Image (tube, grey):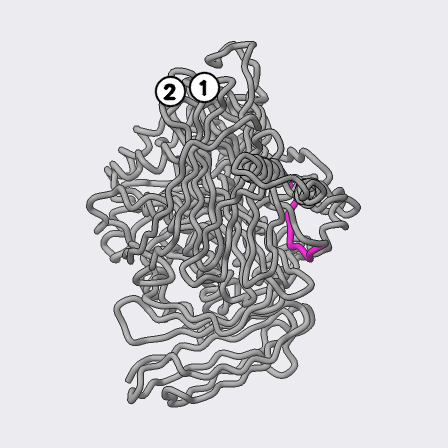
Amino acid sequence: MFKSIIAFFSSINHIKPSPWWGRVLAGAILCACEGVGLSAQTISSPDGNVKLSFSLTGNGVPTYEMSYKGKAVVKPSHLGLELAKDKHASKGMRETSLMDGFTETGSKVSTFDETWTPVWGQYAHIRNHYNELAVNLTQPATKRRMTIRFRVYNIGMGLRYEFPQQDSLVYFVIKDEHTQFAMTGDHTAWWLPGDYDTQEQETQESKLSEIRSRFHDAVNWNNSSVAVFSPTGVQTALQMKTNDGLYINIHEAACIDYATMHLNLDDKNMVFESWLTPDATGMKGYMQTPCETPWRTVAVSDDARDMLSEANNFIYNLNEPCKIEDTSWIHPTKYCGVWWEMIVGRNSWNYTDEYPSIKLDSIDWSKVKPNGRHGANNQEVRKYIDFAAANGLSEVLVEGWNVGWEDWANHWKDYVFDFTTPYPDFDIKALNDYAHSKGVKLMMHNETSSSVVNYERHLEAAYNLMNKYGYDAVKSGYVGDIIPRGDHHFSQPMNNHYLYCVKEAAKHHIMVNAHEATRPTGIARTWPNLVGNESARGTEYEAFGGSYPSHTVILPFTRLQGGPMDYTPGILETQLKTWSDNTSYVRTTLVGQLALYLVMWGPLQMAADLPENYAKFNDAFQFIRDVAADWDDSKYIEAEPARYITVARKAKGTNNWFLGGKCDEHGHQSTVKLDFLDKGRKYEATIYADAKNASYDKNPKTYTITKRTVKRGDTLKFTEAPGGGFAVSIMAK
């Protein structure tokens, strides 16, 4: 079009020029440019590597594109929200959408640079440095206003929609959010099937074009809740790699009062589009202005290590600062617990097998016949308390302590637990007194069976009980289909519930570790008492047939974006048949389990194996005793998605470092130069390594332990076995 306009005016160049023709030419060119989106605004990252452009194209359609070091990352992609015709909306059944028809009414460019101190995490300090473009848009036909805000970091960009308070847009219902991410090619992707209710799937590695053909077999159809929505739907965080070596990660940040975002792929054009989780009504968001959406994020680098460091910080940076004034009660925790023996199948959560169903308000537990397999009994819990006290573990988790486990799962039962009444063989006062006398605390367990209304009904009483007996942390769970019935785990109401529990817990000085909840989006910056989530296949799946050896070297690229995982590592007796009837085995070597305390970072770390199994490998268990759970600094030495990760971390408030490496089923050769150590200082290194003949499947429990004095500049070399790794404690002398 632009060339045609110039050609037209050139064809009439015999006409005498005049100011009028000049104005026509300028106006025509301007209109042409606007029509194809050439009137773009561009903003760059502080280092200039990431460039983002915004324009209104077509009929006033918001459009952006993004590049990195001159390479396209996101091709021109549309933005907008489709609104539902709904009686609850301001326009009711005459509702319109926020997709097109926009004009720009102004914009603002700014720069922000701060350094903040997290309560816990990978780093003592995090820099938050970005350039921002805020574009104000108006729909003249509806007189509605919307701002699209972009923040561009050295690692990528975040964008969100903002809706100021206005007479023409007060209440609206989101039918769909149509945020596009147009890819430049058929990238390699590490993906999970998109699902409204579970993230407990095995990561798939394929080209984008192969997702459709592999989707059905990728779904864990036997999970307690499954709700897939499209044969090309995938979850975030989505890690990709281009043919020319760019690493791209799409996720979201600050998902508050909004539904969790998935991605749906147009696999003919390689365009992802946001796909929100609906609630029980089928709608995807009920909004009231003023409000904003979560940030949609795209991280990019030509170095995979940046995906594990800068990209993670980037998600946190897009969240609000801490809202808890006094955080002194929030602390990293290493714990053990009555858990693994039930997972493997040797003991039970339930107290009795006598009744097919339990009604909590009518049963007399003193008259119930015990099954003899109940794990959360006084004797067993005391054993774990003694073990924790002897080995420097600060807390003991006890699952199955409270009445109701007889018929808790898969019945869509409303009044399933009361969260305050212990079984007859669990003396809550005596056990807590005993634990405190040993310098140990019990960790509360609140499985809700996804009866959310029941949990909120009892929440205050549950937290008061924790305060009464000195609990400072709770592991909550959401196994099964949601009540209110028809809702999904990752909907707007459920996301509001999870955050409500965290906020209420903060009032009681309680830390929260939520299992089966939504995946984190950096909210722990704002509410640091959210010390962990599960939200992916954890160690328990090693007792259910196992996970791929590559599982733990892809999760840091995907699930751990936005917050740590309670992965429950430390299974040193990897062959479960040695102590149970379970024929599964753990898909790592013993040393690979030690490495997880570095690779799967987080302030909540479990020593998940049985005390008697740790006694069998007491020399290797020393690393679990020594390793920190909170860090001043982290150095990613090498990384490749689903292949290997090597990281060094400096323990909080010390000069001690811990080094760990983990790999997939192919093994890995690793060379680490200790250039992160203090100059002039000597250290004692204790090196836990796979033996020469080790492998995760045939010889998992062979390892070597050596000690040597090291200093800055020394080099350590490791041969990681298939499914193996290494772990090193480096203690300052």
Q: Which segment did they paint magenta?
A: 186-196
What label does residue 595 carry, if any?
Answer: none
- Element marked by disc 2: loop
Q: Locate residue 467, reporting x and y percent.
A: 25, 38
The residue wearing badge 1 is 143
**Pointers 2 and 1 in contact (C-beta within 8 Å):** yes
Q: Which residue is drawn at 62% across and 76% down?
A: 668
673 vs 72, nearest the viewer? 72
Number of marks in the image? 2
Judge left or right: residue 31 versus residue 394: right
Judge left or right: residue 340 versus residue 4: left
Q: Which residue is drawn at 61% across and 45% down?
A: 76
Quadrant showing the N terminus: top right
N-term-proximal mark, 2 vs 1: 1
Q: Residue at x 55, y 10 (%)?
A: 94
Q: Residue 677 appears in which quarter of the rendering?
A: bottom left
- Element marked by disc 1: loop
Residue type, mark 2 in image: Gln
Above-or-below relation of 628 to 115? below
- Is 191 one of the magenta-colored residues? yes
The residue wearing badge 2 is 166
Residue type, mark 1 in image: Lys
